[in-house]
């Protein structure tokens, strides 16, 4: 959809990346590192300074005493972290539970590691799971469950009770839980992010993946990490070494600055994203569009059923071309045949969101024009 957006000059609210700069302190650190180095390989599993700063920050937020020497692998984004986690936990033929809708990499990760996904639906509009369905999935003896929290594309933030239910099943069936928590700091009040690894007794079976991409608006720096108990990390380091050798040494050095930001940085991030969400959702309200209000991450799923298009893909192409706003067809995230949802993201500057919102106000009128044209043609 980014290619479609670029081809027709649409405002790109499809692929989730910011159109604003990272924090200026971080850019200054990158300038300094460009002059002073390091410019050669870092330690494969992460530069010591980066791991020390990351351990301090994550211990603080997760409420766990994490050891930079034994609990971390620094990866090329959470994308590599998830692949490392899957290849560490699973052997060919193993099964993994994937909630649907899902971030599209998870099924590819499962297939690449030879594992077979068991899909468990998250039911719109609130994207909760059915306990009996999840129990049935666990009865198939999965090696791992993948938990995206806060979730892309649904914006769901799992409650402590939901996580405790998953924890009980994971314990009962001796299953790993692989988390993707890249949106850990983008959560809207009153929702709160609960780290699965910090639930009672869960650290030993959790492989937590996350990254700096979203928290510091540096999706292109490709800095992520895996957190797990030492025995798991020992194996994960080997997988990581053969996949990528290591994340960019100069960027790890520069990012130490960001990992040292005070708590106020994370509070301001939350305020800034809450404002973006409000600006964009207000346009959706004014345009009379139905959507699921996201509790976390920076995506919103809009229901296009009322427009009567058979294909969400065709709708998104038309939307980019005729209305000038690009979204992602929801069917790319679902295992089930869901064709009535599309996903916008709102990690954009205020003026971009306003420009996109103003175009969306004309959506209904444009759809009516198309319907009239079709009716005239069939007459
Ligand atoms: C749920 C989720 N995980 C991972 C990623 C990619 O993260 P990274 O840049 O750390 O590889 C994204 C990016 O959109 C995402 O939405």
Image (tube, rainbow, N blue to C red):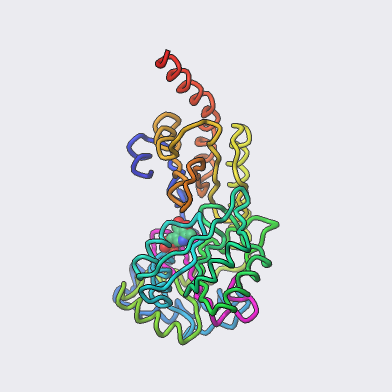
- Quick one: which residue is furthest to the top in this view? 379
Left or right of 379 on screen, residue 278: right
Q: Magenta residues, as a range?
A: 195-224
Say if 329 sits above or below 112 in the image. Answer: above
Magenta stretch contains residue 90: no
The picture places residue 56, in percent across and down from the top left corner, at: 55, 78
Magenta stretch contains residue 222: yes
Report the image quarter containing ligand 1. bottom left
The picture places residue 350, in percent across and down from the top left corner, at: 54, 43
Say if 169 sits above or below 331 in the image. Answer: below
Residue at 52 percent across and 85 percent down: it is: 67
Judge by depth and name the residue closer to the eye, 322 or 57. Answer: 322
Left or right of 121 on screen, residue 379: left
Judge by depth and name the residue closer to the eye, 176 or 64. Answer: 176
Judge by depth and name the residue closer to the eye, 272 or 224. Answer: 224
Question: Considering the image in quadrants, where does the N terminus appear?
Answer: top left
Left or right of 246 on screen, residue 262: right
Question: Considering the image in quadrants, where does the C terminus appear?
Answer: top left
Task: Specify whether residue 31 is in view.
Answer: no
Which image quadrant is residue 170 in? bottom right
The picture places residue 6, in percent across and down from the top left corner, at: 35, 40
């Amino acid at each position: 959809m980014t290619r479609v957006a670029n081809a027709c000059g649409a405002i790109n609210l499809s692929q989730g990346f910011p159109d604003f700069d990272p924090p200026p302190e971080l850019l200054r650190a990158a300038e300094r590192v460009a002059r002073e180095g390091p410019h050669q390989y870092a330690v494969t599993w992460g530069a010591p300074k980066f791991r020390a700063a990351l351990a301090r920050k994550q211990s603080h937020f997760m409420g766990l005493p994490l050891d930079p020497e034994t609990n971390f692998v620094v990866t090329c984004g959470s994308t590599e972290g998830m692949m490392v986690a899957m290849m560490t936990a699973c052997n060919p033929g193993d099964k993994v539970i994937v909630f649907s809708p899902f971030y599209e990499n998870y099924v590819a990760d499962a297939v690449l590691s030879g594992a077979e996904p068991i899909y468990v639906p998250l039911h719109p509009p609130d994207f909760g799971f059915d306990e009996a369905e999840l129990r049935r999935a666990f009865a198939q003896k999965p090696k791992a469950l993948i938990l995206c929290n806060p979730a892309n594309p649904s914006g769901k933030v799992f409650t402590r009770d939901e996580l405790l239910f998953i924890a009980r099943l994971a314990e009962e069936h001796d299953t790993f839980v692989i988390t993707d928590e890249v949106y850990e700091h983008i959560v809207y009040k009153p929702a709160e992010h609960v780290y699965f690894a910090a639930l009672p007794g869960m650290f030993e079976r959790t492989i937590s993946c996350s990254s700096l991409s979203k928290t510091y608006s540096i999706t292109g720096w490709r800095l992520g990490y895996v957190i797990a108990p030492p025995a798991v990390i020992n194996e994960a380091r080997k997988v990581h070494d053969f996949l990528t050798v290591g994340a960019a040494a100069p960027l790890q050095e520069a990012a130490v600055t960001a990992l040292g930001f005070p708590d106020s940085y994370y509070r301001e991030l939350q305020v800034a994203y809450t404002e973006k969400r409000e600006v964009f959702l207000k346009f959706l309200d004014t345009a009379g569009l139905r959507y699921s209000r996201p509790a976390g991450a920076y995506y919103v799923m809009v229901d296009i059923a009322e427009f009567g298009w058979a294909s969400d893909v065709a709708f998104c192409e038309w939307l980019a071309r005729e209305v000038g706003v690009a979204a992602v067809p929801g069917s790319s995230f679902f295992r089930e045949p869901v064709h009535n949802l599309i996903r916008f993201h709102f990690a954009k500057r205020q003026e971009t969101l306003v420009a996109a919102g103003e175009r969306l106000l004309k959506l209904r009128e444009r759809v009516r024009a198309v319907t009239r044209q079709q009716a005239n043609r069939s007459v």
